[in-house]
Amino acid sequence: MRRLTTRVALALLSLSVAASADPPAAAPAPAPAASPPDEGVLGAFVVTGVNTSERLPRIAVLPSLSPDYEDVVVRGVVRRDFELSGMFDLIPDSKAPAGLYGFDDPIDVDAWQKLGAEAIVKVAAQKKDDKQISVLGIAYFLNVGKEPVYQKTIVVPKADARVTAHRITDALIGALTGRPASFASELTFSGKWAQNRRIFRMDADGNSLLALTDPKDTAIAPTFGAPGHILYAVSHDYAPFTVMDHYQNANKPLGLPFTTSVYSLAFNKDHSKLAVAVSEDSRSAIYVGNPDGTGMKKVSTSELATRPAWSPSGKLARVGGDPAQGSQRIWVDGKPVSPAGFTAASPTFCDTEDGIKLVYSVATGNNHQDLVIAAEKGQNMARLTQNQGSNSYPACSPDGRLVAFFSTRDKSPGIWLMSLKSWKAQQVSTQEGESLNWAALPPVAGAP
Amino acid sequence: MATGAFLPRELALALILAAAVEAGLFGLFIVAGIDKAKVTAHEVQAPEEIPIAVKPVMDDLPLLKLGSKKVKAKLPDMWAKQAPVRRFEETSAPSEKAEKTVQAIPTSRVATKDAEAPPPDAAIAKEVDQKLTDAGPPKPEPNLPTEGAADGVKNGTETDPLKARAANLYAAKLIQWFQNRFQRPTGMPCAVIHGLTATAQITVGPDRTITGFTFSKPSGNADFDERVKTSLQAEVGQELPPPPPLYPDLKPNSLLTPTFSGKDAPCADSPPE
């Protein structure tokens, strides 16, 4: 049997050698099957190691000469949003070419091109009837042609002028970059009010500040739940902190199986999981369960465990530590990731253009804190702030392009927004507080 | 006992003077009252109503509706060079209809034999220095069987200008990702390092994770090649930035071919950066 196998093998080998030595001339070898072309956005390129920051596109947000209130509001909000985004080099209004800038007036493209505009954004609003307004948003790429690459006109109630302007900005930035912005969003935080702390909310640009809780109570650690819900821990007359759910101007208790104080809480991306930090035998622990408070299971092991935060991919970060270690650190999925020896706090995740990033604050001495950014698992850490007062409680915009935080910089304490693209920080509020959170407004039908 | 401020005779004198002033004033009123100048009211005569005949003019034309032309927001047309107007030089040719007078003899030169007559509405000049060819009718808009942009190229594939721009931005972001991870060697002479290039091939998985690399064409400089190899090794296992959310189908090629170059590197005989 073995000899037979050897013979067959030798015969096959001789056949193959003969075939390779003398290929038939008349019958060409079949061409290899054509593989589908690789149509990715990048193939061959040159790497020089020059770390240049990305150039900011120069764009124009057309001025408006209309005296209509709604037009002034919409145009002003959109222009401010574009400035806050930190993603564009905006041509100042003072350099705008002379001309008509009405709702339907054409655009002098040559004049804007001479100013270096790569794209033109036009927004306008006009009264439709006593209760409604028409809002127009148009974007042109000057290298593409004279037709707008984005155009949308929507009719909304007059009272929605501001939020509609934010939604128009989000859509226009989406058209310009492929990633919509998130100025149609709100911030919530806990701020001092006389002897107590109250929960506040405000628009992403600092407008419409509103207190949500009773000034007689002490309310802390607000977080966003399902669309429209803000949950927070509240104590009345020094009783343990319990969780309340604010929805449509009403506050209702959330039933949690804890009799001790709740320090903070966080929902995951799709609001299917709730993480809660609670006081437990002079320590703190983190439990994870269902969003209604059922099925809670302890997930922390360290003596200190608080400030839970979920990453968009489902990782759970928290502040953890042990007094024996001398500092509190950021833990991600059960491992400490912040530098040892530095007291870290307030972890949050940003779903940025470069992927998911972990942002937290680190105590730097002199009662100051600074913000650092790292990869999702904590590696490749870099500072976001340095020598600019104390910077704490970071919160990322829903589009991952901006970080909001409390800062004492420039002798002007309050809430500041920093662009993760241009690293430029701008103040949006003079309110001071803690536990900042940021979430998109609930979506509406027919939004741009 | 307190002494009075005024003497009795002083008080009496004051009373007399006050009574005299009051009496004088009263006298003036009396004098004014006996004035004969009287004001009489004149009654204004009301205008008489005069009936006039009004003959309405019937106008069957519809009234213009208040409003304005609805103009779709559109950039103005790009300036286009106008086609040159072809001018014909004035020439004369024999004609049977010509008058047989001295005044009718044409002053222009005689046309060449078999020359065609200019069109009836042609522009005629005494003398044409340069003959212009007719540019013909304006170039029509391209009407191609495939969708695309007027300023596109034949080999282009993207019909959506927004997606094309997003793809450019994403490609720039990916290149920057590699730029940030390449540590250039320093301290070499400019003549050496500026001429060094090394090419590699990087394989990328479907989840944008770098799965491996081959150093296909080293530069020949050990230090430079070592730097390239170190950066490539550090990139294996890392995930490239995600595509923009509106275009999740954008992705890097599964095989990337970066060329590492030392052309912009700081060198020993150049000022520090």
Image (spheres, rainbow, N blue to C red):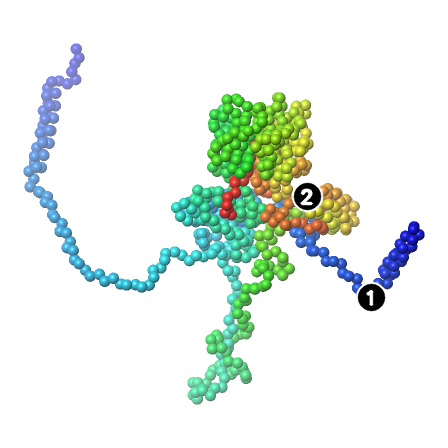
The residue that appears at 91% across and 55% down in the rendered structure is: A7
* Side of B87 relative to A298 (left or right): left
Label 1, label 2: how far apart the Cα atoms are: 49 Å
What's the residue at 10%, 19% (across, down)?
B9
Quadrant in the rendering for residue B140: bottom right
* Up/down of A159 relative to A241, above or below: below
Q: Residue A256 is drawn in which quadrant?
A: top right
Point out residue A351 in the picture as x, y percentages from the top left corner: 61, 40
> Residue under mark 2: which chain is it in?
B
Q: Residues within 10 Å of mark 1 (few under 14, many from 20)?
A: few
A66 shown above or below A323: below
Q: How many marks?
A: 2
For the residues labelled 1 and 2, say whether their Cβ atoms are less than 8 Å apart: no
Q: Is residue A149 visible?
A: yes
Q: Are marks 1 and 2 on the same chain?
A: no
Query: As drawn, is A175 to the left or to the right of A313?
Result: left
Which secondary structure, mark 1? loop
Q: What residue is drawn where x is 63% and y is 29%?
A: A297
Looking at the image, which residue sits at the far right? A3
Q: Amino acid at mark 2?
A: Glu
Provide the chain ID for the residue under circle 1: A
Q: Which residue is mark 2?
A: B239
> Which residue shows up at 72% across the image and 56% down it?
A35
Pinpoint residue A340: horizontal percent, then vertical percent.
68, 29
User: What kind of residue is marked 1?
Assistant: Ala
